[in-house]
Amino acid sequence: MSDDATPIEPAATGKKGAYVDPITCIGCTLCTQVCPNVYEMQDDGKSKATNPSNDTEEKIQESIEACPVDAISWKES
Ligand code: F3S
């Protein structure tokens, strides 16, 4: 009978997007080939999701699966 229970809300804040773990990334560039609008290679030779949601979920999922070292994951924005 408590009225302070917080209702579970669906993610109301924006879309989910890609996140590249820079420690795991080996700079293979595959993600930038699958989703050039999402990832950019950095000067350190690692990829970064500079526009994490800038493609369809299907394409981003494809890029996540393309990474040979599983450096990419979903993150809620
Ligand atoms: Fe790095 Fe994986 Fe992309 S190794 S460059 S995050 S496909």
Image: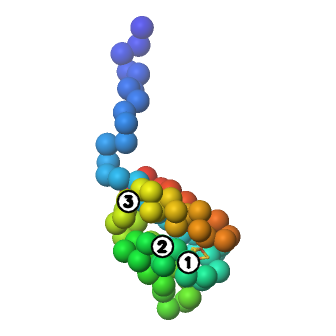
Which residue is pictured at 31% across the width and 52% down the height?
14
Query: In front here: 57 or 75?
Result: 57
- What percent of the width, then of the height, locates residue 50? 39, 74
Give the left or right position of residue 61, taking residue 66 as reference: left
Label 3: how many Cα within 10 Å (few below 14, some 14–19, many 20+): few
Render colour scheme: rainbow
Q: State how far apart marks 1 and 2 are (Cα).
A: 6 Å
Q: State how far apart marks 1 and 3 are (Cα).
A: 17 Å
- The reply to whether dot 1 and dot 2 touch (C-beta < 8 Å) is yes
Instruction: Give the position of the N terminus as an image quadrant.
Output: top left
Query: In front here: 65 or 50?
Result: 65
Q: Quadrant of residue 38?
A: bottom left
Which residue is pictured at 41% across the width and 22% down the height?
5
Helix, strand or loop for disc 3: loop
Q: Earlier in the sequence, mark 3 or mark 2?
A: 2
- Which residue carries the number 3 mark? 56
Residue 66 against residue 77 in the figure, above or below: below
- What percent of the width, then of the height, locates residue 30? 55, 77
Q: In the rendered structure, which amino acid carries the disc numbered 3? A: Thr
Q: In the rendered structure, which amino acid carries the disc numbered 2? A: Val
Q: Is mark 1 within 8 Å of ligand 1?
A: yes
Query: Which label sits on residue 51?
Result: none
- Which residue carries the number 2 mark? 34
Q: In the rendered structure, which amino acid carries the disc numbered 1? A: Leu
Residue 54 against residue 23 in the figure, above or below: above
Q: In this view of the protein, can residue 50 be seen by the observer?
A: no
Query: In front here: 40 or 56?
Result: 56
- Which residue carries the number 1 mark? 30
Q: Is mark 2 within 8 Å of ligand 1?
A: yes
The image quadrant where one finds ligand 1 is bottom right
